[in-house]
Image (cartoon, rainbow, N blue to C red):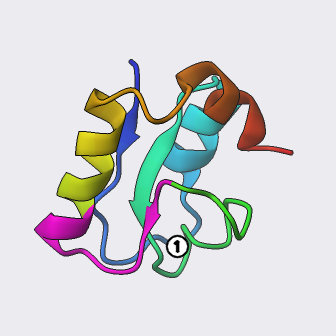
Amino acid sequence: FDYICMTSRYEGFGLVAVEAAFAGVPVIAPKVAGLKETFPPNWPLLTNSLSNEEFETILKKIAANQFDQKILGKQAFD
């Protein structure tokens, strides 16, 4: 996978996100319990809500190559 998009309203732990990040796959996710604690505070792929517009904005940035997938994949656990 190039990216994983989590659209959960709540995650007990966020195991899927952790496994994806461990595999070097950048995760797009909302700042909800169980996910916001999984990534660094400045993680650029976290949205403030579950709104379609925020996910759309991030996906457009990805399509325009504004993020380096390999760097993001490594930064998830830094």
* Residue 15 on image: x %, y %: 57, 51
Residue at x 45% of width, y 70% of height: 11
* Residue 41 on image: x %, y %: 71, 70
Decide: few, some or many residues near mark 1? Use Cα within 10 Å; few <14, some 14-19, many ≥20: few
Residue range of the region highlighted in magenta in the rendering: 45-54
Quadrant into which the N terminus falls: top left
Residue at x 46% of width, y 79% of height: 32
Q: Where is 58 relative to 30, above or below?
A: above
Residue at x 30% of width, y 30% of height: 64
* Residue 9 on image: x %, y %: 30, 77
Residue 60, located in which quarter of the rendered image? top left
Residue 7, located in which quarter of the rendered image? bottom left
- The amino acid type of the residue labelled 1 equals Gly
Residue 27 lies left or right of residue 10; in this view the side is: right
Residue 70 lies left or right of residue 49; in this view the side is: right
* Farthest-out residue, right: 78
* Residue 40 on image: x %, y %: 74, 62
Q: Is 8 part of what is drawn in magenta?
A: no
What residue is pinned by disc 1? Answer: 12
Residue 68, located in which quarter of the rendered image? top right
Depth check, front residue: 20 or 58? 58
Q: Secondary structure at mark 1?
A: loop
